[in-house]
Amino acid sequence: MANNINESEENNVFRFRKKRQINITLILFLLILVYVIIVGIIYLRRTHTVRYEVVEGALASTTIYRGVILRDELLVSNTAPGYVNYLAREGQRVAVGDLVYTVDETGSLNEFIEAQSLGENTLTDRELSEFRTDIINFVHGYDPSDFSELYNFKYSLKNTVLKLANTKLLNNMTSAGAQSSGISLKYSYAGNTGIVSYWYDGYEDMLPEMVTKDVFKEKDYTRTQLLSNELRSAEDVVYKINLGEDWSLVIPVTKALGESLVENDYILVKFLKNQTESWGKATLLDNNGDYFLCLSFTNSLISFVDDRFLDVELAIEDEKGLKIPNSAIAEKEFYLIDEKYVTENVNNTYTVLMQVYGEDGSKTKSAVSLEVYSYDEKKGVYYVDNSVLSAGDVLFGSDETTFVVHDKGSLIGVYNINKGYADFKEITILYQNSEYAIVKSNSAYGLRYYDYIALDADSVSDDQFISQSK
């Protein structure tokens, strides 16, 4: 009986399912995984600022400069109307009284030449050397980007050919019966000693102090070539004579570069046209705010008598300073505030007294702190960011005069990221090539050694929080 009861009880036993417990560890792991994935996506999509550590460096000064040649040039006018035939070769040095050209007043000389058979002519060694010199100078100085030089070479050869032909003609005129042919020639002789040129461009009277940036707009440059056997009126320009051996080459430069170059009185200059070198006396010109390096020479004039513009390479010492990549350089606009309205405090901070409005519309004066990015001592103005000031704000001076914020100016600089945000700093470029720039170190508002800057200035904006990567 007992066994039956036990079997019945065993049959009445029910199994209950165990309640599932929440796996906290698994949930936390999944949450962390989702968080990491989201952060990773945001990180990958974010533009990262690559930082660059500012260090001392140098750049070799191998940049080619283009300058304008200025000489003591005298334009000579025609003495009588007629066909002008040159007898002095271009680039030839003549003395006072040397025959330069003739004038055929009637035009009968050409008819006489065609009617006469002068026979087969050969060139002497001296005559051949004239062609050889012209060709060698052209080959060494030819620049494919300046196709006009090819035309100048063509005209030079043409004048040389005509000069040789005219010389032979004059030597044979008597024997050929020219005097009985009614040919009327006037002979023109040099009134000054110098080097002859058969072109002009209007720059003959220009002095180094008169040079402007417009001079280097060569697309607007006009050069008039004078050819032999052309009809000229009286008082027309027939040739140009270069007086003396002194000449100058004026090159546009920045103020900082110019000041560094003239620290040495003389600079070794390599002329790319013929690969020769010469020492030039260096002076810095300030022509109405534009700066030019003037190199003065006392020789080699005859080599460049046919040129107005010249490419040179300056053999100067390597520029040293803070070396930064060009990609880090940016230009930014600032408000220009008269120095009378800016107060410099003892802790190197700056304040202005600005007009503000209360809630009831009343006007009051309030001292406002601001950041100064540069100071122009010559103009007496501070460069101030627009994060505090706006156009139309009214500032007060100590003498109760007022100043309205409106004028703007630009500065060249980089974005300093030492503090974790983009802070614009002005730079002074001493030298620059296609990849890097050398800037002045330890300037009042500029960079210091070992500062960190944004490698790409276009990737940051003012006061932007920086997510850095090396």
Image (spheres, helix red, strand yellow):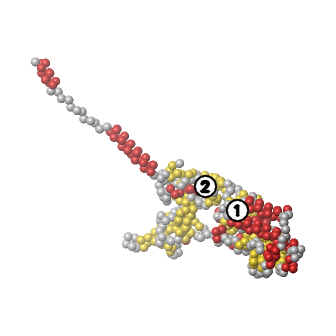
The residue sitting at 21% across, 31% down in the picture is 16
Instruction: Please identify, in this view, whether the residue under mark 1 or under mark 2 is nearer the observer.
Output: 1
Above or below, comparing residue 448 to residue 221 in the picture:
above
Mark 1 crowd level (few <14, some 14–19, many ≥20, 10 Å Cα):
some
Camera-side residue of 397 and 303: 303
Q: Is residue 223 left or right of residue 327?
A: right
The residue sitting at 71% across, 66% down in the picture is 151
The residue sitting at 65% across, 53% down in the picture is 58
First in residue order: circle 1 vs circle 2:
1
**SS assignment at label 1:** strand
Amino acid identity at mark 2: Glu
Q: Residue furthest right?
A: 175
Camera-side residue of 420 and 435: 435
The residue sitting at 51% across, 64% down in the picture is 385
Decide if residue 251 is in sight here.
Answer: no
Q: Position of residue 260 (x, y in %)?
A: 68, 61
Decide if residue 446 is in sight here.
Answer: yes
Q: Is residue 234 left or right of residue 455?
A: right
Amino acid identity at mark 1: Asp
Q: Choose top left, top right, bottom left or bottom right for residue 242.
A: bottom right
Q: Position of residue 8 (x, y in %)?
A: 13, 23
Above or below, comparing residue 57 to residue 146 in the picture:
above
Q: Which mark is residue 435?
A: 2
Q: Position of residue 154 (x, y in %)?
A: 73, 66
Q: Position of residue 160 (x, y in %)?
A: 79, 68
Task: Please give the residue where the numbered disc 1 appears in the rendered image.
Answer: 311
